[in-house]
């Protein structure tokens, strides 16, 4: 059971410690949706249920898949996993700019996006929103969980976005090689582990630097790398150092999977591109204590 006082103490301690990075983590940003950290789980679940009923319309496609309509976004996605109230909170990050998990809030500028790398696409809702922007970017979706990738492609067609969505089923990491993908009860919480090429579940793993070179893609500071890699977020950035140093793309990366990730990621990006403007937002539970949710970086004025 949550102890609200202990959680609040941890939040304040973490926020205070991160003040050593000036301008990174404002108090209003730290407090975004703080109720989800402090309130009892049963109340959070109740709020999720209310949001689910208000914002999501669902239909069963088959024994494993549901079609989920989000009228407020005029988008549809396919979902393989539990149909519980947590699904609303996943969708809320695309519905609500005050959700700390929202990727496209300032300092990210979406006006001139042409290339988006979506590492950890899952159901594709972020990818669909990005593909529908006025600048009509091409969104490269990396989703190594094959059933989820097929759901993404089907939903892209339903949303008439198949011409702007490109699915890549390989994993993304710090080195080129092979990994195995382990899924959980929910398709948004799998993990990637290094393995030998002969492993029966081996998948090709590529760095962002190698991927862009192989594909002949050039990014610039208006483009975006979005990363939600279920704990491999820092490793993905390590495999993109040449791209980041050379092109200064905008970055939105989750930071709540590992205790050390915030400091590691901020330090790396500051070293690669000192002129990045960075913003850290919110707190979220992934293990037993809350951690900051999302780091954004941009050089676009």
Image (spheres, rainbow, N blue to C red):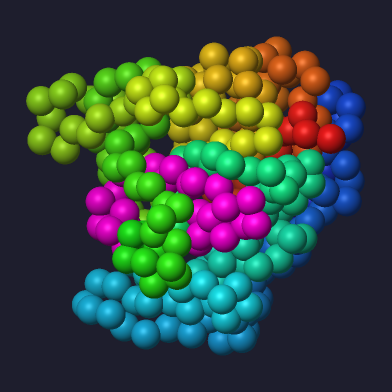
In what quadrant of the picture does the C terminus appear?
top right
Is 279 situated left or right of 212 in this image? right
Residue 129 pos. (x, y %): 57, 60
Residue at 13 percent across and 30 percent down: it is 199
Is 239 situated left or right of 42 in this image? left
Tell me the quarter of the picture where residue 161 sits.
bottom left
**Residue 83 visible, this orientation:** no
Tell me the quarter of the picture where residue 269 sits.
top right
Q: Which residues are magenta?
A: 125-151
Residue 16 pos. (x, y %): 86, 34
Above or below 67: residue 227: above
In what quadrant of the picture does the N terminus appear?
bottom right
Residue at 55 percent across and 72 percent down: it is 88
Residue 267 pos. (x, y %): 69, 18
Tell me the quarter of the picture where residue 53 sits.
bottom right
Is 61 situated left or right of 165 in this image? left
Between 46 and 214, the one nearer to me in the picture: 214
Is 271 situated left or right of 287 in this image? right
Above or below 286: residue 266: above
Between 93 and 167, the one nearer to me in the picture: 167
| Residue 141 lies in the magenta-colored region | yes
Residue at 63 percent across and 51 percent down: it is 135
Between 212 and 38, the one nearer to me in the picture: 212
């Amino acid at each position: 059971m949550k102890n609200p006082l202990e959680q609040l103490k941890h939040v304040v301690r973490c926020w205070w410690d991160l003040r050593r990075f000036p301008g990174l983590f404002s108090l209003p940003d730290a407090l975004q949706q703080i109720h989800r950290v402090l309130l009892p789980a049963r109340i959070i679940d109740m709020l999720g249920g209310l949001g689910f009923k208000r914002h999501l319309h669902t239909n069963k496609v088959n024994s494993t898949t549901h079609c989920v309509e989000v009228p407020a976004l005029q988008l549809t996605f396919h979902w393989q996993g539990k149909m519980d109230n947590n699904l609303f909170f996943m969708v809320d990050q695309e519905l609500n700019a005050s959700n700390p998990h929202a990727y496209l809030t300032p300092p990210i500028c979406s006006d001139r996006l042409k290339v988006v790398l979506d590492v950890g696409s899952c159901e594709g809702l972020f990818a669909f929103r990005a593909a529908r922007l006025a600048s009509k970017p091409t969104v490269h979706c990396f989703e190594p969980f094959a059933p989820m990738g097929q759901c993404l492609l089907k939903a892209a067609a339903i949303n008439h976005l198949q011409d702007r969505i490109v699915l890549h089923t390989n994993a993304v990491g710090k080195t080129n090689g092979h990994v195995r993908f382990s899924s959980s009860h929910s398709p948004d919480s799998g993990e990637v582990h290094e393995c030998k090429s002969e492993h029966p579940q081996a998948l090709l793993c590529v760095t962002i630097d190698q991927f862009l070179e192989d594909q002949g893609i050039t990014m610039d500071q208006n483009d975006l790398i979005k990363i939600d890699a279920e704990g491999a977020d820092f490793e993905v950035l390590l495999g993109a150092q040449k791209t980041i140093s050379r092109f200064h793309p905008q970055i939105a990366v989750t930071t709540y999977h590992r205790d050390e990730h915030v400091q590691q990621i901020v330090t790396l990006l500051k070293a690669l591109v000192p002129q990045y403007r960075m913003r850290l937002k919110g707190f979220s539970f992934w293990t037993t204590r809350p951690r900051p949710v999302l780091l954004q970086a941009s050089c676009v004025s």
